[in-house]
Amino acid sequence: MAALDRYGLTDEDADQLRALHSMRGAIDAQTVSVPWIDQIELLVLDGFFDFTPVQGEILKCLIPRIPNVIVNLNHDEQNLHIFQPFDSTIEHLQSNAPFEIEKSRPLEGSRLTAKLFNVAQVATSQTASPKDEQPQTNNLRCTLCECSDRELEIRSIAKEIKRLVLTDNYQLSDIALVVRERAAYADTIVRVFGDEGIPCNLERRVEAADIPAIRACGKLFQLLRTAHEETANPKASEIAHLIKTGYFRASDESLDQLAQQFDQKYSLLLDESGKQSTSNDKLRAALGVGRWKPDDLENVIAYVGSELHVNAWIDRAHKLIRMFPSADDARSLISGAEADDPAATAEDEALQESDEVVMDRRTRPAPVAPAAIAWTILIMRHFQQLLSAMPEECALSDFLSNKRQARTTLLKLLSMSAAAKVCAARFPPPSAALNTRARLCRQPDRQRGLQLRPTPP
């Protein structure tokens, strides 16, 4: 243990013992407390049926402190001998606190489930009463369909499934689709069944890094993990990446305040557009002033210079506004700035080839309306202030003592858009799977529930 502590390592068993001591209120002869446990209102234990001695002692200390505790265990009345180990678990839990046992009702009409998980009983009943079986002389038990491609094959199967459900009163949970190579059929099954309105569950897994909302949060955390000086003055491209994800935006209240600042500082830019017949309201809407338009903001950021830091980006944006309404002056300003940039010069030299004409492959950005640049300046400054307001570091005790304030600060950093809220929501499983899961019912205060659910097929 001393070697582990010296190198900052840990041991699973030691961690469990340490957690048990903390629950009992003493670690190394020092009094400790875990106040946040008293704020827990619901504890759900699911996915296992046995506890180690240390885990049992932890639950013995934990269960009496939580008002509502629910334990989910598998159970089958027709195979009681298989689930005998659960009896000791139930006795152990009831020794800690009184539990109410609630057994989930078996699914009605699930013929396939009964046959699959009670093969011996089904075979015995069929052997004992062969006279009760109906003759199968003219009953086709197998239908062979010849299809030209995989798309037509799956679509024919989908139509047969719909026929069985609609005309023969089959349940979707009684129907299984078996293919030789699941990976080869997976995309086709999902697409065709989606078109036909048939719910299916292929248990397809998606890596967390491939979820758009997780990637967006990763960009934010990657920006916040840098030094505080860099976080207070990040690159314009980093803010553009956050905006482009579609999961982070300025709040509606902030947009209203920024629109008022625009009217105070840059309202005259709307009169210099040269479009005398267009009202200011239509022009503001076209330029995105006072609104949240990620694509327009990204274009303006790239036009001014996405590789610049925010302070330098704002300075160049102000220069561009002063040079307007002349678009040629704006082009010359950008070209001149890039000519003095060593990185840009090196990129141009890399394109030169012997005895050939130099080709400038970088596309010069088209001029942007000065009002759009001014609006983007306000957005960039607003994001910069939000990032600067985040503390660089704090002790865990300070965070726990001021968790409400810390949570409010984090939520104010960037407001989640409607798309993020929808993506973060937990969607229910397909309707076919709803019939095979026991519903989790919250018990009244100071009560505990012990659910027994049928073994899922």
Image (cartoon, rainbow, N blue to C red):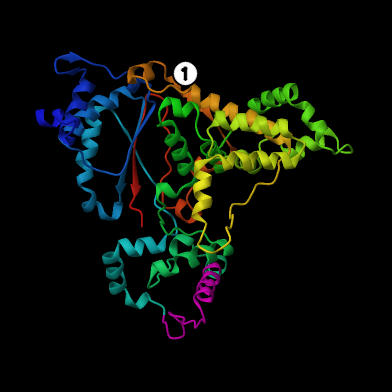
Residue 153 lies in the magenta stretch: yes
129 versus 336 height, above or below: below
Residue 379's x, y, as percent?
62, 30
Residue pointed to by mark 1: 405
User: Which residue is painted at 40% across and 66% down in the image?
Assistant: 183
Query: Residue most toward the bottom?
Result: 137
Residue 250 visible, this orientation: no
User: Which is more toward the observer, 346 or 64?
Assistant: 346
User: Which is more toward the observer, 284 or 252?
Assistant: 284
Residue 431 visible, this orientation: yes
**Relative to residue 358, is residue 135 drawn left or right?**
left
**Count of residue discs:** 1
Question: Which residues lie in the magenta part?
Answer: 135-162
Which quadrant of the figure contains the C terminus? bottom left
Residue 75 lies in the magenta stretch: no
180 versus 399 height, above or below: below
Q: Which quadrant would residue 68 be assigned to in this image?
A: top left
Residue 95's x, y, as percent?
22, 29
Q: Which quadrant would residue 173 be assigned to in this image?
A: bottom left
User: Which residue is painted at 40% across and 28% down in the image?
Assistant: 227
